[in-house]
Image (cartoon, rainbow, N blue to C red):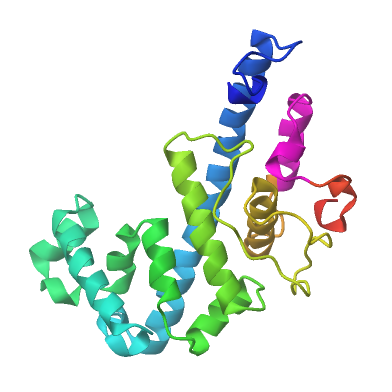
Amino acid sequence: MFAFQDSNRYFKPGTFFENVIELYNFDSAFRSLVFNAIEKIEIALRAQVIFCYAMQYGENWYRKSRYFKDSSKHLDFLSKHKQALNSSKELFIIHHFKHYPPLSIECWKSLEILSFGELSKFFENLNADPCKTDIKDHFKMSSLDMLENWFHCISIIRNICAHHGRLWNRTVWSIMLPINGLPGGFVQNMSVSGNKMYASLCCIQYLLNAIDPQNDFKQRFFDLINKYPSVKLNEMGFPPNWRNESFWR
């Protein structure tokens, strides 16, 4: 409602209840669209971490501190993760504990129950070794620091979506934008705010392009804003003429 009120909390002239409903409906549909896109990114990251590291270091590598930058964070992870495994209702976890020693649980089972937020922190704490570099290259990123930041910021947006929070005009965790572009091609206008949804949408679209070049996220977003033309995209950090960017064409 604040978007339709002035500094004295009075509704601005020309405001109708239909405007409020339209913005609500847009935000709900936008939230679903973004949530669905982030799901694909989360699954891709989890699959890459499990596959790359298991192939290189074996099925129980995640328990060994030598693969992590901060051993104390790793120990804290193991402690909390043990509790999560013990209380898990997932059938594949219950089956493992019923038939095999608890500490033998493989990474493709164990890491499956991590939330995206937990997974992003887990990834950030991994050493910058060839496996992590391979994952960076899979997502067509030029910097591990930037990729870690993207996963962290996107995981926060994911939680906002999951709890039905407002995305339109929201100030989010500031996402790092590439100064010199990215291997897969990125937007040219770097004067945008990193803590508005436009910047995060650019990063989400970029990661989706790396995962699946045939993804339909861009078209579905265009369809959404065409359905709700009165929604002010500048409130989400969209710059003028953003659709002229080759990245969005």
Image quadrant where residue 202 sits: bottom right
Image coords of residue 91 (percent x, y): 21, 52
Residue 221, image x and y in percent? Answer: 71, 39
Residue 59 spot, x, y in % from top left: 30, 80
Q: Is residue 25 above or below residue 218?
A: above
Secondary structure mostly taken by the magenta-highlighted segment of the chain: helix
Count all numbered tags in the image, as a single digit: 0
On screen, residue 96 versus residue 174, left or right, reads left
Image quarter for residue 205? bottom right
56 within the magenta span: no
The residue drawn where x is 48% and y is 55% is 155
Q: Above or below — where is 191 with respect to 236?
A: below
**What residue is shown at x 23% (from left), y 72% (from top)?**
76
Could you say which quadrant of the image residue 58 lies in? bottom left
* Left or right: where 83 falls relative to 248: left
Residue at image position (51%, 48%) is 157
- Boundaries of the magenta span: 218-238
Residue at the extreme front of the image, as rendered: 8
Decide if residue 40 is on the left or right side of residue 217: left
Quadrant holding the N terminus: top right
In front here: 81 or 193?
193
Query: Closer to the camera, 87 or 216?
Result: 87
Query: Was residue 221 drawn as part of the magenta stretch in this picture?
Result: yes
* Percent of width and height locating residue 193: 70, 54
Task: Look at the picture and state if 213 lies above or below 29.
Answer: below
